[in-house]
Amino acid sequence: MMGVSCAAGLLIVLSPGVCDVHPTPKGRDLLAKAVVNAIAHS
C-alpha cells in the first residue's frame, strides 16, 4: 500500500502525492526495528 506508506511519512516525497520507493529516516528506523524483532524471535 504505497499510498498509505507515503501518507504516513515513511517514504521520501518527490512531489505532492508522489513518493519514491526509498524510506525516510522514520521509515528506515521502522523497517530496521521490524528486521531486528524478526531475527530476535526466530
Image (cartoon, rainbow, N blue to C red):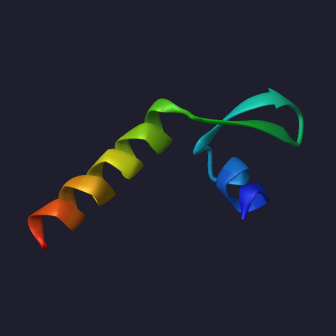
Say which residue appears at 65% left-offset and 55% top-offset: 5
Instruction: Write down the quadrant of residue 10 in the picture.
Output: top right
From this view, report whether residue 27 is shown above or below residue 16: below
Q: Residue at x 31, y 46 (%)?
A: 32
Q: Give how far across and how far down residue 41 sits, in percent.
A: 12, 73
Residue found at the far bottom of this picture: 41
Foreground residue, 39 or 12?
39
Q: Is residue 30 left or right of residue 18?
A: left
Looking at this rendering, what residue extends furthest in the front direction? 42
Q: Quadrant of the N terminus?
A: bottom right
Q: Is residue 37 above or below residue 16?
A: below
Question: In the figure, residue 18 lies in which quadrant?
Answer: top right
Q: Residue at x 78, y 38 (%)?
A: 19
Residue 39: percent from left, percent from top = 16, 61
Task: Identify the residue shown where x is 63% and y is 53%.
Answer: 8
Percent across and percent down for residue 2 are 74, 56
For the C terminus, the quadrant is bottom left
Left or right, 17 with respect to 39, comes to right
- Of all residues, the one furthest to the top in this rendering is 14
Q: How far across and how far down the image is residue 21, in percent?
A: 68, 39
Q: Is residue 15 left or right of residue 24?
A: right
In this picture, is 20 found above or below 31?
above
